[in-house]
Image (spheres, helix red, strand yellow):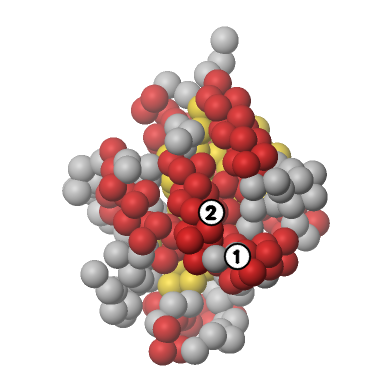
Amino acid sequence: MVQVMHLYVDDSGTRHPDRKPKHNPAHNRDWFSLGGVLIRQEDEAIARTAHAEFMGRWELDPDEVFLHSWDIRHMKGDFTWLAGRSEEERNRFIEDLYQLMARPPFTGFACVIDRPGYDARYLERYGRQRWMLCKTAFSVLLERAAKHARKEGYKLKVFVEKGDPDVDRTMKGYYADLRSNGMPFDGGGNQIYKPLTASEFNETLYEFRTKNKSSPIMQLADIYLWPMSMGGYHRSNITYARLKKDGKLIDCSLSDEAIPYLGIKYSCFEKVKIKP
């Protein structure tokens, strides 16, 4: 019987390299990221049960209300009701949500690209021929997840959140290219990094599918991605720091030397002033 891991992938930010941020530049955060959670197929029932129990405790209809990081953090959309609750009850909700993230056997994976850093590195060299940020992020994310799956003796099935049909086709094309041609770029001459070959991708990548936001585990991929993205800018972000302390991120199972090559990828962060 084939053993399969499932990688649930959400996105954060805009994939266009020349997008102008709407937020205050003083916040020093402008990213595009792809990532979410990796889970063994046989463990999915644990995650789905935990999600159902959480929704039941808070009297949220799982067919109508989907967990979305931005809405929860800003108390908007389906979570405007949080604004009318006491601080104690809001804190209880956030803690319960964190326990939902921490209990199932998830491993957080992501590739986060700092947009100003990407522009500084590639604009003069490639101009308008620069790749969309999702091409780099998807390739790096899948390779690192595939390496982890191979190490554990598993195949890898990839679920990407369903969105614009053109974007979905583009992502599926990236997946097919990895299976046919391998990584679209090399490791920059670094001897520690050895990219997977097309043959290795082909034998590891088992299936590509899109999933609606109604998927409980896709919702949890969304909830995971924001703190992993924030971790590139602010290491003491509360949720990121807790996930790391509780061993929920891929970095937690790697040596310090291996993290830059196998862990969460923070790309083009050379000019970012990272908060400790």
**Looking at the image, which residue is at 28% across and 47% down?**
245
Residue annotated with mark 2:
93
Q: Disc 2 residue type?
A: Phe
**Looking at the image, which residue is at 36% across and 28% down?**
151
Q: How far, Cα to Cα, is label 1 from label 2?
A: 10 Å
Residue 223 quadrant: bottom right
Q: Where is residue 145 in the image (x, y as percent from the top left)?
A: 45, 40
Residue 262 appears in the rendering: no
Residue annotated with mark 1:
85
User: What crowding class fits label 1: few (fewer than 14 Cα within 10 Å), some (14-19), or many (20 or more)?
Assistant: few
Q: Do the residues labelled 1 and 2 touch (CB within 8 Å)?
A: yes
Quadrant where the N terminus lies?
Answer: top right
Left or right side of 168 for 236: left
User: What crowding class fits label 2: few (fewer than 14 Cα within 10 Å), some (14-19), or many (20 or more)?
Assistant: some
**Looking at the image, which residue is at 70% across and 46% down?**
59
Residue 237 appears in the rendering: yes
Q: Where is residue 55 in the image (x, y as percent from the top left)?
A: 66, 43
Q: Position of residue 122 (x, y in %)?
A: 44, 77
Q: Is mark 1 on a helix, strand or loop?
A: loop
Q: Where is residue 27 in the image (x, y as percent from the top left)?
A: 42, 84
Q: Is mark 2 on a helix, strand or loop?
A: helix
Residue 166 quadrant: bottom right
Q: Is residue 245 above or below residue 121?
A: above
Q: In this view, does 85 lie above or below 255?
A: below
**Looking at the image, which residue is at 68% across and 67% down?**
80
